[in-house]
Amino acid sequence: MESDKIKEMLASALGDCDIEVDITGNKLVLRLVSDIFEGLSQVKRQKKVYAILNDMVTSGEVHAVTMYTSTPREIGR
């Protein structure tokens, strides 16, 4: 599993987004900042990201995902 591949998948689905990916074994930690999250609850934000990673999760390539999703406004940009 490569962080560049995951970044590309997320960027193509989320558009203009700041993406950080940390990988340890088959566990991901994602930090995502995007306007696309504006007005969405944390649960809806996570569902949006899981939909992108669904194939990797169902195949077992990714076992666990920890994600931090924010809008630029929420982090003071």
Image (spheres, helix red, strand yellow):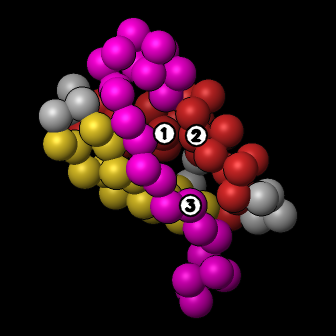
Judged by depth in the image, the label closer to the viewer, 1 or 2, is: 2
Q: In screen coordinates, is 68 left or right of 65?
A: right
The residue lying at 28 percent from left, 38 percent from top is 27
Q: In screen coordinates, is 42 left or right of 63?
A: right
Tell me where residue 3 appears, x and y as whole percent: 25, 39
Query: Nearest the camera: 25 or 16?
Result: 25
Give the CA separation, mark 1 to mark 3.
12 Å
Tell me where residue 53 appears, x and y as whole percent: 49, 28
Give the CA separation, mark 1 to mark 2.
8 Å
The residue lying at 56 percent from left, 61 percent from top is 69
CB under 8 Å between callouts 2 and 3?
yes
Magenta span: 53-77
Q: Earlier in the sequence, mark 1 or mark 2?
A: 1
Q: Earlier in the sequence, mark 2 or mark 3?
A: 2
Which residue matches tag 3?
Answer: 69
* Residue furthest to the top: 59
Amino acid type, label 1? Leu
Amino acid type, label 3? Thr
The residue lying at 79 percent from left, 58 percent from top is 40
Q: Is 7 included in the stretch rendered in magenta?
A: no
